[in-house]
């Protein structure tokens, strides 16, 4: 016996199907989900400033080593110190970020989920430019200079600023070796060594922030939980009220001997899982030469078009005030 049913497929392109199924309405939700991480924690930590050139610069200085010798009574001053002999200039080239979009006249006219129109294309482009900036800040690349032959201005990433071996930064202002960890694992002792090294640079109990990749975040959460060959006596025990049926195993705030360390997740699309940057927001900035904005271009017949762009650079005002962890795999 013949039956009217819903499972006789209709070819969407040719529209050649027949039967009761061709009358069934589509069920398409008005909700639009973007499956991609959008957060920009590093950019958010930067103080915002203004750049007036393609090369944004700032000066740094250090104090001389402490002198504990006394001065003899009646001694005259016969020699003088140059108080600015160690002053240096640091800088970074600006970089332009851009994302463009074009929507056809027909697509602009039809009713769509989201919707998929010119305004939404602009909003998405803004989000993508911000994430591009975050990924560039997170990078290990050095800056490049525009040469008019295909090489644009690009900025030095945070991974290159936090580098003890680079000659691009004067020796007095490089990140100390003790503030950098490169290995497949990290222990609580190693993290405290980094924090102690950062403290030794300015002697301040700063509120630091660790922007951590997923593997590094897990490793830190495991500090007080388990250990290889650990016994019950050397595993940190936490007593929690069980009525809520919730066990807290994450670490978001680490109280060290050298200050508080807030731990936040890095954008996984911008930072490697085993990488983390210890940030002192006091010494981190982002200078803008051209603020982010959108520009609408001439419709040449195909539909409205435009682009979003901005130009700016990362300012690491004192590389010695930062720390870096790389290579974590577990």
Image: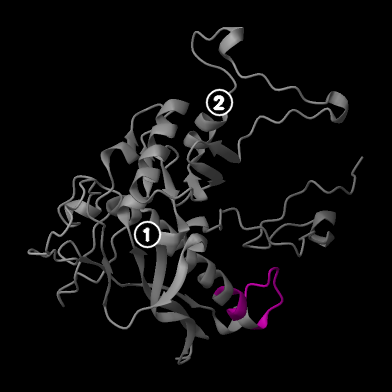
Q: Is residue 112 magenta?
A: yes
Answer with mark 1 or mark 2, whichever residue precedes in sequence.
1
- Badge number at residue 136: 1
Name the foreground residue: 179 vs 276.
Answer: 179
The Cα atoms of the two marked residues, 1 and 2, are separated by 29 Å
Which secondary structure is most common in the magenta stretch? Answer: loop
Specify whether residue 187 is in view. no
The region drawn magenta spans 109-121
At numbered mark 1, what does the secondary structure look like: helix, strand or loop?
helix
Q: Are marks 1 and 2 in contact (CB under 8 Å)?
A: no
Q: Position of residue 50 (x, y in %)?
A: 40, 79
264 displayed left or right of 132: right
Residue ID at (69%, 72%): 112
- Asked which quadrant contains residue 232, the reply is top right
**Badge count:** 2
Secondary structure of the residue carrying numbered label 2? loop
Residue at image mark 2: 222
| Residue lying at 25% horizontally and 71% vertically, measured from the top left | 153
Task: Judge left or right: residue 125 versus residue 161.
Answer: right
Q: Is 225 above or below relative to 77?
A: above
Residue 314 lies, in percent from the top left, at 36, 65
Q: Quadrant of the N terminus?
A: top right
Looking at the image, which is closer to me, 23 or 28? 28
Q: Position of residue 248 (x, y in %)?
A: 71, 31
Q: Neighbour class for label 2 at 10 Å: few (<14), some, many (≥20)?
A: some
Please state the horizontal and vertical placement of residue 207, each as a whole percent of the image. 52, 50
Q: Which residue appears at 88% of the width and 27% of the height? A: 243
Is residue 198 visible in this depiction of the protein? yes
Which residue sits furthest front? 74
1 or 2: mark nearer the eye: 2
Does 133 appear in magenta? no
Residue at the (61%, 74%) spot, across then down: 120
């Amino acid at each position: 016996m013949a039956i009217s049913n819903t499972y006789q497929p209709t070819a969407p392109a040719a529209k050649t199907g027949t039967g009761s199924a061709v009358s069934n309405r589509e069920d398409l939700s008005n909700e639009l989900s973007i499956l991609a991480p959008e957060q920009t924690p590093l950019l958010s930590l930067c103080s915002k400033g203004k750049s007036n050139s393609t090369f944004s610069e700032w000066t740094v200085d250090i104090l001389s080593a402490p002198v504990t010798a006394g001065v003899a009574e009646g001694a005259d001053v016969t020699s003088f110190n140059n108080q600015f002999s160690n002053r240096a200039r640091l800088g970074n080239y600006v970089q332009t970020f851009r994302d463009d979009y074009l929507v056809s006249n027909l697509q602009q006219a039809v009713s769509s989920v989201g919707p998929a129109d010119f305004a939404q294309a602009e909003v998405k482009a803004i989000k993508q430019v911000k994430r591009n900036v975050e990924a560039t800040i997170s990078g290990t690349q050095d800056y490049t200079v525009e040469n008019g032959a295909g090489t644009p201005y690009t900025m030095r990433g945070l991974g290159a600023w936090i580098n003890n071996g680079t000659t691009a930064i004067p020796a007095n202002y490089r990140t100390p070796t003790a503030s950098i960890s490169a290995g497949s694992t990290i222990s609580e002792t190693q993290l405290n060594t980094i924090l102690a090294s950062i403290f030794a640079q300015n002697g301040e109990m700063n509120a630091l922030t660790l922007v951590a990749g997923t593997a590094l975040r897990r490793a830190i959460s495991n500090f007080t939980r388990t250990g290889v060959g650990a016994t019950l006596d050397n595993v940190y025990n936490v007593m929690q009220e069980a009525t809520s049926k919730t066990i807290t195993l994450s670490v978001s705030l680490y109280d060290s001997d050298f200050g508080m360390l807030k731990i936040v997740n890095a954008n996984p699309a911008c930072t490697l899982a085993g990488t983390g940057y210890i940030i002192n927001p006091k010494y981190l900035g982002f200078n803008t030469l051209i603020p982010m904005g959108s520009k609408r271009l001439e419709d040449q017949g195909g539909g409205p078009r435009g682009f979003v762009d901005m130009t700016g650079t990362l300012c690491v005002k004192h590389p010695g005030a930062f720390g870096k962890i790389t290579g974590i795999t577990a």
